[in-house]
Structure formats: C-alpha cells, structure tokens
Image (spheres, helix red, strand yellow):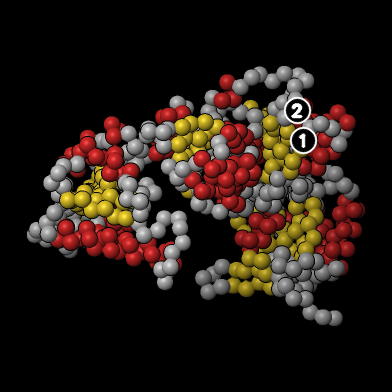
C-alpha cells in the first residue's frame, strides 16, 4: 500500500474539514481472487465506487470487484465517449478525451467535497497504463489520496506462461503496441526480456516488428491472463483478427536457454556471423540493432579489449584474442558458424572502418564458407565521435586515413596525405601513433604543412567516450607528436575550417558547408 497526497504532500486543500478521500484501487489482472486484501478493504471503506467503461457500458473493473460491492454503494460509471472510433468533437479524439476526463473528475470532486470516500477501480495497477491516473492527476493534489497497487497483466502473463520473465542482470522492458513500427523494432532488437501491451488492432504491426528484429520465434502470447477465455501460445501462430486489447506479447528471460539448447553438431545447418561495432567506448554508443545482435549471439569473438565492453550473458561463449590476429579470428568465427553457432564478431567503432569487417569478408569469400551467412552492422566510428565532441569539423568534404604503416608502406601514406591536403580536404587520421610507432605524426605534420597554413586547427581527441576523454585543439604547426598515442584520433582542418571560443570557455571547431568559388 502506498500513501499519495499530491506532488508536494497533502496540499493546501487536502486536510480541509469534511473533505472525502480518493482511493485508486488496483484490482489485479482479472481473477477476483488475485485482488489484494487492501483492495478489498478499500472498496469496503468507500461510499462511492467509480469505474471506467466503453459506451457498451460493460466494465471489466466492475466485474472483477462485483462480489465486494454493496447495495448502498453509489456507483459512478465513467463512460468513454470514444475508444478507437472517430469523433466529430471539435478538438478531435484528444479533445474528446480531455473533455471527458475533466467532466469525470468534476463528478468525483462533487462527492469528495461532500465528504464521501471515492474508490476508483482499476484493472491491474492504477498507475500502470491505467485509466485511474487521469483522475489522479486532476484530484490527488486537492484531496487526501491513497493508491493501492495491484498485480499487473505483465506479471500475470509470465505466471501463466510458467517461465521466468527476467533473471540475473537482465532488464525488463515494457512497450505499448501503439508505438510506431520502426520504434518497436529498434527497442525489441535492443532489449532483454520484453512485454508488449495494448495489442488488439496493433497486433499485425507488433508481429512485423518482432519478425524484423529477429525475435518472433521466441515471442509468446497471453490473452486475458487469469480471466475467463484465457489463451496462450506462440505469437507466430496467432491469427491477427482474433486478438483482443487485453493481451500481451512476452519475450521471456534468455538465461539458461543456451544450456538447454541442443549441443552443436559438426555438419548441422550453418549459423551466421554478424560483424558489429561497439562504437568508440561503452554501451551508450551501441545502436539498437547491434545490441540485439550481441544479445542473440551464441558466441562472441574479438579483440579482448572490445569484448570487455560487452556485458556478460549467461550461456554465451566469449573468445578473446590479441589485436594482431584478425585473419585467424575471422576464420575461427566462420568455423563456429559452420557448426550452427550464431557468432558476433566484435570490433571497436564501425566494423567497416579499419576494423574486422574486411577480414571476415575476405575469409568468407573462400569456397569453404560459401554457405555461411555474413552480415555487417554499422557502428559509430571514431571520426564521427571525435567530430561531435569538437563541434562539426567534418561539415564539408573530408578524407579518412590511417597513419599505421603496419599494413601499407609509409610512402603510400605520405602520397595520400599530400593528395588529400592538396585537394583541401579535412583529414581524419586514425592510428597516429603507438609505443612502437613514434615518428609518423611528425612526418605527417611536415607533409601537411606543405599545403596547409601553420594555424590550421587540429583536433586531438583522446579516448572519446571513455574515462580518459580529452578533446582539445592546437594549430597544425604546434602539433606535438609526444601528445599523441594509439587512443588519439586527429582531425586536421581544411583552409575553411574555423575555431572559436564560447563565453563559457568551450571551443567549437567547424567546417562551413559552403565552399568559396575560385
């Protein structure tokens, strides 16, 4: 039981003599035996019992509480003027509902002003997608108010399915089926356990979102949980025309399912390899699609530093390795997929920018892996992350180069630097230095000064998104190689790039989108 007396305590009017009490009574998911003891007591204390219904007049809330209603109860049926149909109200659908809520609150206020206790019945929990909350927002600051929580339909659905809803570090996400399909798809792909409510007419859209996010096979369906006519099954098997509003789609806990699955067998149908990027740092930089792929994988393969960014999941295998064995790592992932495993190859940043996608695709081009599906999912690359921190230095044409001469000769790097600098492109320079490569930044500065003014802004972005993040701007002539390491990305401006200090001390760097005519 929770006592609620408005957002700032009881308010000026809450303790006035003769004022009645407002009770928001959660009735649970439908079975009257699942009402709490306090809910039954609250109905017994009430002088007035109010409940919502559509225009047909049948109230599910009233039917749940029917055995506890007395002949001397004053009943207030709050009948919605519209539910899903159209309306000729001048304010449209939203206007019609706002007028209804205001009128309903005024009716209840009249009883409260007369000193009567008013119990507003609510299916499930009063403050969880319930109609009661509209009365609460209009009345709780004016009258003494108590909200009695109830068992939600989500909890009831999980109980009826007989499967854990969420375990260990899993997060439970509750979504309304009324969200746009693209938003549903993104959230389904990136979530652990999920409950999707408000199905009915939204069911075809929800089903498509489940299929697009790759989660249809695990989705379960519960209709009228704990009520007469209850039905459960797989979402994939449900006919859309048969789905009522009071139904829930559930993606239950994944914990333990990996161990329960059949062991991999050599020669079984292939799984797949998905190459993903974790962005420049931690979970805040992951896309919903990438989150979904990481969650669905049986095996994670990657450089240990990048694997450490991915939360551990029960039953998921992790295969970490050194950063210099990309080809071996790619073939290892493809071999796992040949044996039926779903494999996520983990890169930092974007997997297609100086990262693992190339190595995987090169290996997958061999006849041996012709039947293994391979997908590449985009990620936030370091250049974009650094540019965002600095302002908008990549606002016009730019080139992306790696200063590492481990996989190509320095002569090629210098030639490309000269070409890009001569073309007056902004440059994003990856892999500028390491413990074993200490001279490349200095040489690059010399090459660039052949074509760029000494005061050209250079952004030094180190560990963007990490604990050691530091972003600053220096003139090209003052670029100090000692201040640059492997975790630093350089953005060298063009002749048009500008830098300015703001009154708060921050500095913005940007490259105008319009280039002057010559």
Q: Where residue 207 appears, x then y in whole percent?
A: 58, 42
Q: For numbered disc 2, what is the local secondary structure?
A: loop
The C terminus appears in which quarter of the rendering?
Answer: bottom right
Question: Which dot marks residue 60?
Answer: none
Q: Residue at x 24, y 51 (%)?
A: 50
Q: Is residue 314 left or right of residue 247?
A: right
User: Residue 28 placed where, x, y %?
Assistant: 32, 38
Residue receiving disc 1: 373
User: In the figure, is residue 512 to the left or right of 518?
Assistant: left
Q: Residue at x 56, y 73 (%)?
A: 502
| Quarter of the image with the N terminus in it | top left
Residue 9 higher or lower than 339, as above or below: below
Residue 167 shows up from this direction: no
- Residue 36 visible in the snapshot: yes
Task: Name the residue that disc number 2 marks.
Answer: 270
Furthest residue to the front?
56
Image check: 498 left or right of 207?
right
């Amino acid at each position: 039981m929770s006592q609620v007396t408005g957002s700032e305590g009881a308010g000026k009017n809450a303790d006035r003599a003769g004022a009645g009490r407002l009770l928001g009574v959660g009735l649970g998911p439908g079975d009257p035996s699942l009402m709490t003891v306090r809910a039954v007591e609250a109905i017994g204390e009430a002088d007035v019992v109010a409940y919502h219904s559509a225009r047909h007049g049948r109230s599910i809330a009233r039917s749940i509480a029917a055995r506890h209603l007395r002949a001397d109860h004053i009943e207030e049926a709050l009948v919605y003027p519209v539910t899903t149909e159209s309306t000729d109200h001048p304010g449209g659908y939203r206007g019609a509902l706002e007028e209804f809520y205001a009128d309903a609150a005024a009716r209840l206020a009249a009883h409260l002003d007369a000193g009567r206790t008013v119990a507003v019945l609510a299916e499930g929990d009063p403050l969880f997608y319930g109609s009661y909350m509209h009365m609460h927002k209009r009345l709780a600051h004016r009258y003494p108010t108590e909200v009695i929580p109830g068992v939600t339909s989500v909890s009831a659905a999980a109980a009826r399915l007989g499967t854990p809803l969420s375990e260990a570090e899993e997060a439970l996400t509750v979504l309304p089926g009324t969200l746009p399909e693209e938003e549903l798809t993104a959230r389904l792909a990136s979530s652990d356990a999920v409950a999707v409510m408000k199905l009915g007419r939204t069911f075809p859209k929800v089903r498509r979102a489940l299929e697009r996010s790759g989660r249809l096979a695990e989705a379960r369906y519960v209709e009228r949980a704990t009520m007469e006519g209850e039905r459960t099954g797989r979402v994939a098997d449900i006919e859309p025309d048969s789905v009522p509003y009071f139904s829930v789609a559930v993606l239950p806990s994944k914990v333990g399912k990996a161990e329960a699955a059949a062991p991999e067998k050599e020669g079984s149908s292939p799984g797949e390899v998905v190459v993903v990027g974790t962005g420049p740092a931690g979970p805040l930089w992951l896309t919903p699609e990438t989150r979904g792929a990481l969650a669905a994988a049986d095996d994670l393969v990657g450089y240990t530093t990048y694997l450490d960014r991915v939360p551990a999941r029960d039953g998921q295998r992790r295969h970490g390795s050194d950063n210099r064995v990309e080809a071996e790592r790619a073939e290892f992932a493809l071999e796992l997929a040949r044996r039926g495993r779903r494999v996520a190859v983990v890169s930092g940043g974007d997997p297609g920018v100086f990262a693992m996608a190339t190595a995987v695709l090169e290996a997958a081009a061999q006849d041996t892996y012709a039947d293994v599906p391979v997908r590449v999912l985009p990620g936030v690359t370091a250049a974009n992350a650094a540019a965002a921190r600095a302002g908008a230095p990549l606002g016009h044409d730019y080139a992306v180069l790696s200063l590492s001469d481990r996989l190509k000769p320095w002569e090629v790097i210098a030639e490309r630097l000269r070409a890009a600098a001569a073309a007056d492109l902004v440059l994003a320079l990856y892999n500028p230095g390491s413990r074993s490569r200490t001279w490349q930044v200095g040489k690059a500065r010399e090459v660039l000064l052949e074509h760029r003014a000494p005061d050209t802004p250079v952004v030094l972005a180190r560990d963007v998104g990490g604990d050691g993040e530091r972003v600053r701007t220096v003139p090209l002539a003052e670029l100090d190689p000692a201040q640059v390491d492997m975790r630093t990305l350089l953005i060298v401006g063009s002749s048009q790039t500008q830098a300015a200090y703001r009154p708060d001390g921050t500095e913005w760097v940007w490259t105008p989108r319009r280039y002057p005519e010559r």
